Amino acid sequence: MASITPIYGSDVSGFDITIGSSPPDSNFTNIKGIAASADGTIMYFCTSNVFYHGVLKSTNSGATWSNVNNYPSTTAFSSIACSSDGSIVHAVILGDGLYTSINSGTFNKVTFATNTLPGGGANPESPTGGQFPGYDLTNIFQIACDSTGTKLIMTTNAAASIYYSTDSGVTWSFLYAPTGYSLTPNGPTTVAMNADGSVLYAALNTNTISKNIIVSKNAGARWASIPMFGQIGPFTTLSTNSYGDFVFAVNSNSDLRIFYPTHNDYASVVVYPGTTIGRIAAYNSGNNIAIVQNIYGSITNGAVVTYSIVNKYAPNERTPCFKEDSKILCFKDGKEVYVKVQEIRKGDLVKTVKHGYVPVNMIGTSKMYNSGDKLRGTNRLYVCSPDQYPGLTEDLVITGCHSILVDTLTEEQRFGTIELLGRIMITDNKYRLMAFLDERATPYLEEGVFPIWHIALDNDDYYMNYGIYANGLLVETCSKRYLKEISGMTLIE
């Protein structure tokens, strides 16, 4: 089960976030959005009905806050998002548009390429769609962004359509109009986006059929409802982890739910007795969350509280795996033979490049959605073909973060490895080259959800892995620690 533990609570009741009050008063419900850097060091929140403060910033994980909003001084913000390092910030003013800071806090209004909502007749909010006359991009209401701050998802206060930008909000494309939108919306469509902008979530709070959460795993090309397990919206605030494999949602009763679509599961966590939750922002790969709430300890009129999360499942977007039916070189019945990865069991002997035959310690399995397009990224499958890899006996399909073991890396491959992992990785005196960084590996062009598998071999070092042969290609296993504690895969005997 999932659990949540408070780390620190800061009192924000001293900020004048209720307009015209005398003396100035705080109402935490006027905090309309919160955003956090990937490590949680930098945080922002934005307010509506502001008297003095519109956007506030913390550089010490929420311990202290300062005003960074410079324009305009009395404007109501409705949503906020920031890049993974906290340097790029986007804030929305309903009726006025999008404001962006590229220096951690000095905001300037974004000039849209056009104010017209895109999508033509397919978009009910556009002039051609005609269901919401007079609406344009100044009706932007809810927003989320990727780790770079350049990819954005947004919805308007019509709550009928979803939009996407790849240039920091200058131009927008129409993504989707959910079935059952309302012509008289009474709540926003809240949104969330993962680190690379490929996984998008939206809570359909004005949907007249069912107030559910939908997801796209291919940057908005296709959408589907996640399993809801009887949980009903409206969900007033959403946040996802950097991999997009689970989503935090708060319903109208201030119940915090964590949905794990990859594992077809969910969890409920109790934040703090008697708490009313305003807004949330996940960080640290979803292992922490910042929550705007009414009370915390002696704080009775508005707090921003950071929490650590023990999730039911570990994030698994970067899991290195084999697609089902990949063949691993083993030793059986006195001879070397290739065995389908899903047929391997604990104790089977696998041939390694430097350590002879080593018994299997653990086998893990999961499922991965593959977009089927040609876009390169970590969260997809790749094909290694014999014409590109000498020694391959047939095509090998592996995940983007599964490493081929090589003697050298190019400068570009070194940079990409360090950018993702923080350092160059070596197994059995070979460099680990992740498939998505290897131009010889090509995107697997079949769309669908595919079973994936991985193995860990016996090793006295809990953290070490091996070089093994899959379809004739030298690749990595994972360590016992990775498979058990990090992968999020289902372990089988």
Image: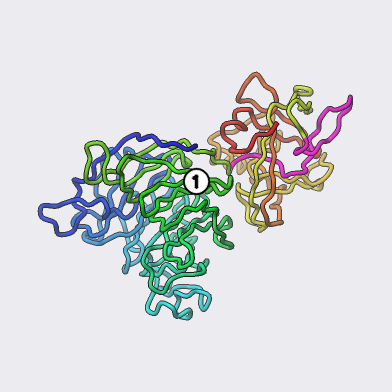
Q: Which residue is mark 1?
A: 242
* Residue at 68% over, 29% down: 362
Query: Which three-letter amino acid code belongs to the residue tagged 1?
Result: Ser
Provide residue 444's location: percent of width, then percent of height: 71, 53
Query: Does residue 156 appear to the left or right of 72 in the view shown?
Result: right
- 290 or 389, nearer to the observer: 290
Residue 120 in the image: above or below residue 25: below
The span picked out in magenta is: 318-343
Residue 443 in the image: above or below residue 267: below
Q: Secondary structure at mark 1?
A: loop
Residue 243 is at least partly visible in this image: no
Disc 1: CA contacts within 10 A as few (<14), some (14-19) or many (>=20): many
Q: Quadrant of residue 235?
A: bottom left
Residue 462 in the image: above or below residue 221: above
* Residue at 56% over, 49% down: 261
Q: Quadrant of residue 427?
A: top right
* Residue at 60% over, 28% down: 481
